[in-house]
Image: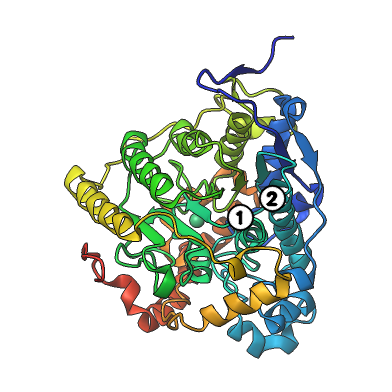
Amino acid sequence: MSEKWTPVPEETQKKRVCYFFDSDIGGFHYGPGHPMKPTRIRMCHSLVMNYGLYKRMEIFRAKPATKREMTQFHSDEYIDFLSRITPSNMGSYVKEQYKYNVGDDCPVFDGMFDYCSISAGGSMEGAARLSRDKCDIAINWAGGLHHAKKNEASGFCYVNDIVLGILELLRYHTRVLYIDIDVHHGDGVEEAFYTTDRVMTCSFHKYGEYFPGTGELRDVGIGKGKYYALNFPLRDGITDQTYRDVFRPVIQQVMDTYDPSAVVLQCGTDSLSGDKLGCFNLSMKGHADCVKFVKSFNKPLLMVGGGGYTMRNVSRAWAFETGLATGVELSPSIPMNEYYEYFGPTYELDVKPSNMEDMNTPRYLDRVRNILSDNLRRQGGPPSVQMQDVPRLPIDEMMDDIGAEDDLIPPDERRHQRLLDTRRQADGELSDSDDEGEVRRLTVARRARGESSRASWASISAQRQALHLTALDPVPIRPCRR
Ligand SMILES: [Zn+2]
């Protein structure tokens, strides 16, 4: 049988790839009608295996992260709460649920803490293997949960596997670059490292009346971290070509200026065309071009998942990107696999763009690029790291330092904006086949009661939006703070 891939022509050097997968991941459910479906990771894995990519990489089941490991970033109280709460005892934790923002976007479900442990364990172990030169690229599609905060859940994320992975990398690497191509701002990661130059965060995201409401152009970091946070706010409908025209030059300049020794790429696929919660117009290849470009710098690379709510497309893109990591392009026809029927009617791998309008004008993009470019020049080259900051410190000491820096971050008044408030679902879209029938049944039931599928979220939205007006302001381009 012929191979189900072709070598990437520009591939110069074969990478050692470690891929993390835990078969338990597909068994978790956020609840009826919730758009986040861990099954998408198993669908992706099924494609990866049936394309034969296991021949080109090492596959691991990571040790789930422990409570103690999670508290390297998160507060003890918060992790303790996550580990205790279950659907059957949640009635006794009403106050805590409010305090930790658990219940709406981030529901309590069976096995929630195990799910968090698997997600975080993969990113931490991936980082650890990269640091010990056991591989060149580590992949954890169950990770990428970029909205989780030190002390609260947010946007379907409870434990921030990315921050934990970066902390592991920082034990051996002087400078880590974080790049985020999810349609939402990478707020949890940015906030964690907002005051340090050891990590530079770069997020490309939809901005303006959109979850989580942060990620303005003028948010550049503070203190030692000033100019080490970069935000590219985008508008609806960005195409492959436009995205490439901003992503490549910005990342090139970041690499030249910051010169990181390791890179973390959050590959959220809600930036793909046709995503249930997204509003961009990227094809699979347009999304994957970011992976190709970041990989071309030949730095130790941790690739993680993230958002992505049209399951058949999430799994397509991540399988294709797994192939790219190993140096091949998967062939266009999807091989037989246990989820084959989800990929009809075309049974092709590609995710095609739609004809939606691109609201990102050349003038707007040029202006943003110029401002970001000026900010990067203000960095004045890669920061040096003093001996006391260099790794091999006991990890707890390092965590103490980061904890202290956190206190400098002003309280985020917009934190309770909900991801589901901003869903752009046309009527009837909820009946999409990849909701396993569950959502369809709910929608039918709601219609029978005369409700639209949005109604249940709208009332909460009104209450919350009253508290978080900043997220609804018009979106002017402001010059950066001087
Ligand atoms: Zn997202």
Q: Is residue 350 left or right of residue 129?
A: left
Q: What residue did someone put label 2 on?
A: 131
Instruction: Say which residue appears at 20% left-offset and 43% top-offset.
Output: 362
Q: Where in the figure is residue 301, as x and y percent of width and height?
A: 60, 44
Q: In terms of depth relative to the viewer, which is nearer, 120 or 318?
A: 120
Seen in the picture, residue 260 relative to 13 is either above or below; the reply is: below
Q: Where in the figure is residue 459, as x and y percent of width and height?
A: 44, 76
Some atom of ligand 1 lies within 8 Å of the CB belonging to the residue at label 2 = no
Instruction: Say which residue appears at 41% left-offset and 81% top-offset.
Output: 413
Would you say residue 87 is visible in this rendering?
Answer: no
How dense is the environment of label 2, judged by Cα within 10 Å: few (below 14), some, or many (20 and up)?
some
Q: Where in the figure is residue 251, as x and y percent of width and height?
A: 40, 45
Q: Where in the figure is residue 100, as x and y percent of width and height?
A: 61, 81
Instruction: Say which residue appears at 60% left-offset and 73% top-offset.
Output: 153
Across the whole image, how many numbered discs are drawn on residues?
2
Q: Are marks 1 and 2 in contact (CB under 8 Å)?
A: yes
Q: Earlier in the sequence, mark 1 or mark 2?
A: 2
Q: Amino acid at mark 2?
A: Ser
Looking at the rendered structure, the secondary structure element under dot 1 is loop
* Colour setup of the view: rainbow
Q: In terms of depth relative to the viewer, which is nearer, 448 or 141?
A: 141
Q: What residue did someone put label 1 on?
A: 173
Q: Is residue 366 left or right of residue 192?
A: left
How dense is the environment of label 1, judged by Cα within 10 Å: few (below 14), some, or many (20 and up)?
some
Looking at the rendered structure, the secondary structure element under dot 2 is helix
State the CA–CA distance, disc 1 to disc 2: 8 Å
Q: For the N terminus, give its image quadrant.
A: top right
